[in-house]
Image (spheres, rainbow, N blue to C red):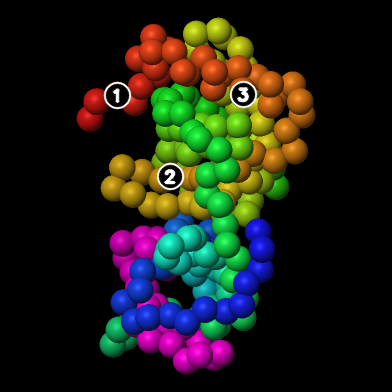
Amino acid sequence: MNPQQGLCFQVEEELYVEPTAGSPGFHSQVVGFKVSQCLILEHPFTDSGAHQIRTNDLLWVRCFRNKVLRFRVKVLHILKSPMQLLFLEYPKTVEEINLRESNRKKVFLRGTFLDLKDRKRDRSWEGYILDISDSGCLMWGDFVHLVDRDVLLNFRIPWTGENIRAKARVVRCEVTDKGMRSGLKFIDLDEGTRSRLRTLLKSLEGQEIKSIVAEPEP
């Protein structure tokens, strides 16, 4: 990711906020700003779980233009009345990010996650992989992962019985009306795990396998 100079915002521009302090991500809009001083966003407290954000928390924020940009800022102030607003530092630098380093294949595979910062049993979750590549995957489940937290993903390939364990970093976590979606980026893969992932992806190119792991009809 290459650092870039700060950017100029527009009122009503949509942003995506990725807390690092226990709250899931949420979409918001710019309602005002002072260049080099602060950025003011709508703060959807009740709908997003964002009530867990506190003053001085650090947040990742993404903006979506002709490319995806990300910056990290501190919470300066939270206003709940008469309007619900979030006051953030104005970013000094931003980074261009590549959300998908390689093409992903749609799947529907059960997996478990272990939080590598706290390996207690109650820090393990079950969920489903919705798509996957040799660089990352999209997970769904009723849990919240902290952005930038490292997890251990474990899942079994149903048509071969082979087990895959891969270390990954949470790059986003979003609340949807159907549960939480977490974007994971694989890190520190050994050659054996990388080879098994590539074999899995190659097998997903077959039409018969696609029908086995296709996401079920709603």
Specify whether residue 44 is painted magenta: yes
SS under mark 3: helix
- Disc with the residue nearer the chain's start (2 vs 1): 2
On residue 216, the disc is 1
- Disc with the residue nearer the chain's start (3 vs 1): 3
At x 57%, y 62%, the residue is: 96
Q: Give the percent coordinates (x, y) of residue 189.
A: 73, 33
Look at the numbered discs 2 and 1 and tell me whether their residues touch, using CB distance below 8 Å.
no
The residue under label 2 is 181
At x 49%, y 64%, the residue is: 62
Q: CA distance from mark 3 to mark 1?
A: 23 Å
- Disc with the residue nearer the chain's start (3 vs 2): 2
Q: Give the percent coordinates (x, y) of residue 186.
A: 64, 39
**Residue type, numbered disc 1:** Pro
Look at the numbered discs 3 and 2 and tell me whether their residues touch, using CB distance below 8 Å.
no
Residue furthest front in the image: 66
Specify whether residue 208 is painted magenta: no
Q: Nearer the viewer, residue 59 or 134?
A: 134
Mark 1 crowdedness (10 Å alpha carbons): few <14, some 14-19, many ≥20? few
On residue 197, the disc is 3
Q: CA distance from mark 2 to mark 1?
A: 17 Å
**Residue type, numbered disc 3:** Leu
Q: Quadrant of the N terminus?
A: bottom right
Q: Nearer the viewer, residue 138 or 48?
A: 138
Q: Give the percent coordinates (x, y) of residue 129.
A: 47, 31
Residues in magenta?
Answer: 26-51
**Residue type, numbered disc 2:** Arg
Q: Classify residue 51 by image quadrant.
A: bottom left
